[in-house]
């Protein structure tokens, strides 16, 4: 099928040409050379970017109602590259019963999935300890042994701004009014989920790594100007098919109250990679 980039169809589907907005970040999985060393065709478009694309039809259909009091499950299971044309489709449903969205390439290959629902009550947030870096403390190089379930990663504070939000929305081709001052000044969900990724690079100097999936409970929407504390702790780690995986509990709070609670699954070391 032919896909016109950046077009919202009458039935709420969305087409977009993927951009590798993470190419200049520290994570070499988004760099052509780094990704090719691991057998990929080029630098990977981040899962958070694809997640941002998946949220667009939901924002169009439900407005701010999907930004708080919701549970979401997202998974990214096939590579997306710069310039790939994606078709984002929503299955029938609503927030009460749950609405599922899928991202496919022009070839029909399914690359990502998102389901969002609004339950009667959100699960109780998991306790995530606080652990700020000491002044002048440098990040250590990543090692598998240094990931210890129950031992917290270093916390950080995030002060999102309207300019940061505008730049994020522009990078993912999302012009929804929700994210402007007139529309409520809500932070784009992709920009918020990016902070869960940030917990990894805040803890270690990383070799290439991959975001696999996220389960998110949103207790309150975040806005530009909020003072957000971000904590993370490994819950589990394991090895499978040569990959070294980890499951992180990430807690974002404002004034001590929970905002976003994320179960963040990552591949700390893809198969074939050795610790520096």
Image: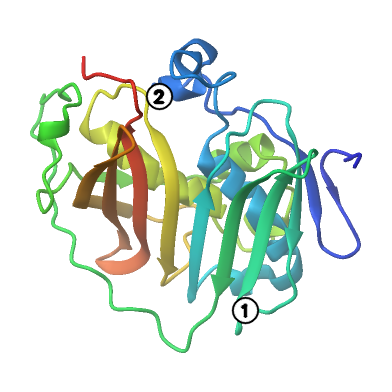
- Compared with 25, 33 (above or below) is above
Mark 1 — residue? 95
Q: Is residue 180 visible?
A: no
Q: Position of residue 44 (x, y in %)?
A: 55, 28
The crowd level at tag 1 (other Cα within 10 Å; few <14, some 14-19, many 20+) is: some
Secondary structure type for disc 2: loop
The residue shown at (90%, 42%) is 1
Secondary structure type for disc 1: loop
Q: Position of residue 141 (x, y in %)?
A: 18, 21
Q: Is residue 68 visible?
A: yes
Front residue of 123/190: it is 123
Mark 2 — residue? 27
Cβ atoms at labels 1 and 2 below 8 Å apart: no
Q: Position of residue 235 (x, y in %)?
A: 20, 55
Choose the circle earlier in sequence order: 1 or 2: 2
Left or right: 216, with 68 as reference point: left
Front residue of 266/20: it is 266
The residue shown at (77%, 45%) is 108
Quarter-of-image position of residue 25:
top left
Q: Position of residue 215 (x, y in %)?
A: 42, 61
């Amino acid at each position: 099928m032919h896909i016109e980039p950046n077009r919202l169809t009458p039935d709420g589907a969305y087409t977009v040409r993927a951009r590798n907005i993470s190419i200049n970040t520290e994570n070499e999985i988004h760099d052509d050379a780094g990704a090719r060393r691991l057998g990929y065709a080029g630098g990977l478009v981040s899962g958070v970017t694809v997640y941002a694309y998946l949220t667009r039809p939901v924002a169009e259909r439900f407005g701010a109602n999907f930004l708080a009091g919701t549970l979401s499950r997202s998974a990214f299971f096939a590579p997306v590259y710069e310039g790939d044309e994606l078709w984002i489709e929503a299955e029938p449903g609503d927030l009460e019963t749950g609405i599922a969205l899928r991202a496919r390439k022009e070839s029909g290959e399914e690359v990502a999935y998102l389901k969002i629902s609004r339950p009667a009550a959100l699960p109780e947030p998991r306790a995530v300890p606080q652990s700020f870096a000491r002044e002048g403390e440098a990040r250590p190089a990543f090692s598998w042994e240094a990931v210890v379930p129950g031992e917290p990663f270093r916390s950080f504070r995030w002060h999102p701004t309207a300019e940061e939000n505008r730049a994020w929305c522009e990078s993912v081709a999302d012009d929804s009014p929700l994210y402007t001052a007139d529309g409520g000044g809500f932070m784009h969900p992709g920009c918020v989920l990016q902070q869960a990724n940030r917990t990894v690079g805040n803890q270690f100097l990383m070799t290439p790594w991959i975001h696999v999936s996220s389960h998110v409970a949103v207790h309150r929407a975040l806005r530009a100007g909020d003072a957000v504390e971000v904590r993370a702790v490994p819950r589990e780690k394991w090895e499978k098919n040569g990959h070294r995986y980890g499951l992180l509990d990430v807690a974002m709070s404002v004034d001590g109250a929970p905002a976003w609670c994320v179960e963040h699954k990552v591949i700390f070391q893809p198969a074939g990679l050795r610790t520096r």
